[in-house]
Image (spheres, rainbow, N blue to C red):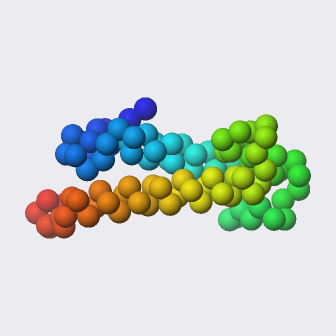
Amino acid sequence: ESSAASDVYKRQGLINGTQEQCLNDAYGRMWALQAASRLLSAHALRIDPLREAARDFLIRAVARDPEGDTVADLEAQLGEITAQADEIITAALAAAGPVSKEES
């Protein structure tokens, strides 16, 4: 599902449909991670000390393959998603150029 902002960015040629989908996927996965993390702890979540049931919950909430993925798979996926989103956003900001005070 696209957002109003991503529709504007697509119309301006700053991102394409594939990039929009990647950003939407990253948003959804990071939101799922945040929600699951808050259910497990009121503080920043560290995966290492979690018990097996809590790790399984986190994997089911966020991983691509909730039944087959491991904690290492999840960590790799989150790193990949973050790197892809960063690349897309950095390129879009560079293409958009500087924003003047009048535009902001």
Q: Is residue 1 left or right of residue 48?
A: left
Residue at 51% over, 42% down: 25
**Which x, y percent locates residue 18?**
39, 40
Numbered disc total: 0
Q: Quadrant of the N terminus?
A: top left
User: Does 104 appear above or below 35?
Assistant: below
Name, please, the residue furthest toward the left.
Answer: 102
Q: Is residue 61 left or right of residue 21?
A: right
**Which x, y percent locates residue 33?**
64, 50
Name, please, the residue furthest toward the top.
Answer: 1
Q: Is residue 17 left or right of residue 80?
A: left
Tell which of 39 and 32 is nearer to you: 32
User: Does 57 appear above or below 87?
Assistant: above
**Which x, y percent locates residue 76?**
66, 57
Residue 66 visible in rendering: yes
Residue at 59% over, 60% down: 79
**Which x, y percent locates residue 90?**
35, 63
**Among the 4 quarters of the image, the one containing residue 50:** bottom right
Residue at 66% over, 41% down: 64
Residue at 19% over, 67% down: 98
Residue 38 visible in rendering: no
Q: Is residue 67 left or right of residue 52?
A: left
Q: Quadrant of the C terminus?
A: bottom left
Tell which of 3 and 40 is nearer to you: 3
